[in-house]
Amino acid sequence: MRKDRITRREFFAGAAKAGIAAAAASKLGFGWLTTPAEAAQPVVVVAEKGEPKDLLARALKPVGGIGKYVKKGAIVALKPNGGWARAPQYAATTNPALLAAMIRACKDAGAKEVKVVEHTCDTPASLTIEQCQIKKATEDAGGRLILLTSKGQYREVSIPRGKIIKSDLVSKDLLDADVFINLPIAKVHSQTRITCGLKNLMGVNFDRQAWHDSPDLHQCIADLATVVKPQLTIVDALTVLLTNGPKGPGRTKELNTLIVSTDPVAADAYATTLLGLKPNQIGHLVKASALGVGQYDLSKVTVKKV
Amino acid sequence: MNTLRKISQIVFLAGFVYLFLATTRVLSAHIPTHIYFQLDPLVAVVAWISTRSFYAPLALAFVSIGLTLLLGRVFCGWFCPLGTVIDLSDRFVLGLRDRLPKRRKTAESERRRWPLDRIASLKYVVLIAVVVCAALGTQISYFLDPFAILYRSLTMVFYAPLQYVLRAIAARAPGIAISGFVDVGDLQVFYQGHVIVLIVFVGILSLGLLGRRFWCRNLCPLGGLLGLLSIYPVLRRKVTDACTSCTRCASLCKMAAIGTDYKETLITECIQCYACVPICPPKATSIPIQIAKSNVYYEPDITRRRLLQGAGLGAAWLVVARGGGSAKHSVRGLPISSDVLIRPPGAIREDLFNEACTRCAECIKVCPTNAIHSAIGEAGIDGFMSPVIIPRIGYCAQPCNWCGQVCPTGAILPFEMIEKKWLFIGRAVIDRSACIAWYKDAECTVCDEHCSYDAIYQKVVDGDDKPFVNDEMCIGCGECERVCPVQPVAAIRVFGVGDRRDETRQLQLEYRRLAVLQADQLADPDVDAAAYQQVSGREVFIKPPEPKY
């Protein structure tokens, strides 16, 4: 039987479905871009001692569980630190086991697609992402690796609150995702003292050279953080790099710690203390705080150890 | 047989293109991508003569030599990929020519009858010049070797646009086999010297305007070499008495191998393509396997005059090459022609390098960072088109050793990744008048961040951190020069002075090697135990195992 017309009933059913889908999309899409700053005191969850997978499960519970952020059918964008062509032991890049565990957690929560977005510092991108084993971790866990290598993968975003940068090219995959989770590793950094969540966001913009040319890199990082806001920041402090960052090779220390927070600045501030520094020494944390991105002062943050 | 020959030509051209595409970091490990070059007798003979050493992998060339002795110039007719490309383009080019109003195609103009075709002996002049140059210790075969020409053209001219196509396919159909051909994300759109390569390639194809297979017939030194080798092959053209002298075979023969009475064949020219067999109206022509002497002549047109011309040409080239800042005029084994001559790691001694390198561009193709380019003036006239690293465009990535793996002639010897820590290719120097950390106290540490060898450190000078280079750690990979935000010329630049082939570096090298090996053994988590065994098992790559005079 040929069916070339739709009945009235089918029409209404279809229209209703589309309406629900559109409503859901408007609720989810771009949601993280417009999340208002939380009024209550920010919470930083610190999980210690354990395997990455176990740590992750423990640390996500106090912030509401993964299900609070990753809804069924959502498209998730993860931003690990996979910038350097170094083996994971050097602690220059995000732990691949942690990344794999996070991808699996998102999948289990019903995510439609988990994108792992990275703009590597070292070239070639493919070789770099292989060396730090993020490629293997992503593929094993069923995520989709997206290497940002051409300008077409970016979209212009205006930064109304920016002091130096007024607009910037940001990865489309990240902007179009329903959920954005930042997965940095805590390291010392030769220029910005530490590199963690906020500094990791430098890997979603197009032109890094311009930032280095600008008079104040710290301010650039803070400016971008006013528009690119991860819903969750999960800091890998399993093994931290204490000297000769960001690429190493340097002295590493196993801390077996995971830091989870909805406040990107607070998470970084706590990670700073693990690296033996004070948050008020880190320019971009102070400046991001001043722009209202988050709270760097740990005395105004609730730290929950689990 | 004519059809079979065409199929063979297409298959071997496709194989060549496949191996070209497969010359990537991922696939080179599994596929012998340089096998065509090792089958090329001209590459082998010139490399052996000019370096005075027998580089064993090139012995595969004896297969082609044996084939030619047995069957004749089938290499040219059936296998040579450049020959196939010329055949294909000739159809187009000749069609174009016939459309020109003034050139009316006549049987007479198409007919190129031996021995009137005197120009065919030019290829022997070229061959002699190539061999004389090799004997005197320089290399010019690279400019004329058919495989080198084709591979170079594919890499430096066609690969850049091809990458867009490959990437588009790989992006739309991720599962299919093509994904191994392209390192997604590593677009390499510029190769220094590509215009020269393009001109040579187009020039060779447009020689088709003068007649079919003009290049193979008159200029190709490999064709000359194989012609000399086809002394008494078993595949020989035979014409029975049924021949009516209709001239069709002679006007069709693209190699001008058919003689005045259409029964004679010049065996040094015949490429056994069988084109003359099916078109013979009385079916008088055949190219059977036979031992009996038929009307076949082995008369390579090498007169004393040709010999002298060839030798003179070779000697003249030597004068030009050596007079123009050659690598042989060097201080302590380093060329003085340029301060920015940076060779890929694993390169052999500079003078031997220029002699062994056949400029095939395999290293240029395989390099994942677009670091290796073809030299224009960097290596002197002697080293024209040889591979050099241009760090501003691409740097030598630490976890990579593929240029050594793919080199067919051993100009770049294979090395292990852990050896890169002492395979110095240059040394970085900071220009304090351009460095923004030095002259305007900017907070810039990009070079320090990126250095893979921990060779840049910060020291407080006048109250601010300033970058310094640790000469003992710097291997000259050029990553700092690549990433330096100062435009257009980087404030930190790599110069050839730190090359490991420089004798002044030897003591430092030995120290560094021992330190690295000990450190690797103890602490470096990156060291693959098997790779370490492999390195420690043989003589470590401090001084490359060089051929002896």
Image (tube, coloured by chain):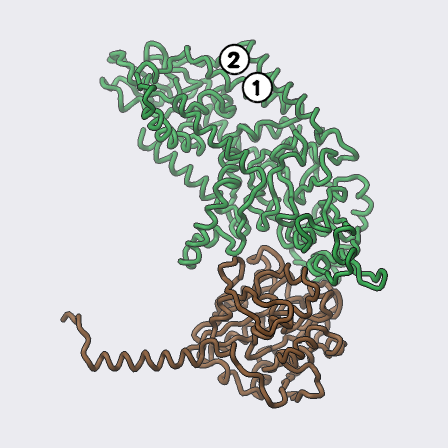
Chain colours: A brown, B green
Amino acid type of the residue tagged 1 in the rendering: Ile
SS label for mark 1: helix
Tell me where residue B544 appears, x and y as whole percent: 71, 40
Q: Which residue is mark 2?
A: B302
Q: Looking at the image, which is closer to me, B402 or B457?
A: B457
Q: Residue at x 62, y 86 (%)?
A: A42
Q: Looking at the image, which is closer to me, A170 or B160?
A: A170
Q: Residue at x 59, y 12 (%)?
A: B308
Tell me where residue B412 appears, x and y as whole percent: 64, 40
Category of crowding for the residue at label 2, using alpha-carbon neighbours closer than 10 angstroms: few (below 14), some (14–19), many (at least 20): some
Category of crowding for the residue at label 1, using alpha-carbon neighbours closer than 10 angstroms: few (below 14), some (14–19), many (at least 20): many
Asked if the residue at tag 1 contacts the one at tag 2, i.e. Cβ–Cβ closer than 8 Å, the answer is yes
The N terminus of chain A - image quarter: bottom left
Q: Is residue A1 above or below residue A15?
A: above
The Cα atoms of the two marked residues, 2 and 1, are separated by: 10 Å
Q: Is residue A224 left or right of residue B94?
A: right
Q: Is residue B164 visible?
A: yes
The dot on residue B328 is: none
Task: Work out whether mark 2 precedes mark 1 in sequence or the reverse, and give the earlier one.
Answer: 1
Looking at the rendering, which quadrant does residue A61 occupy? bottom right
Q: Is residue B187 above or below residue B274?
A: below
Q: Is residue B293 visible?
A: no
Q: Which residue is mark 1?
A: B128
The C terminus of chain A - image quarter: bottom right
The chain ID associated with circle 1 is: B
Tell me where residue B340 appears, x and y as whole percent: 70, 41
Amino acid type of the residue tagged 2 in the rendering: Ile
Q: Residue at x 71, y 77 (%)?
A: A272
Q: Is residue B35 above or below residue A84?
A: above
Q: Is residue B335 above or below residue B113?
A: below
The chain ID associated with circle 2 is: B
Q: Residue at x 64, y 72 (%)?
A: A222
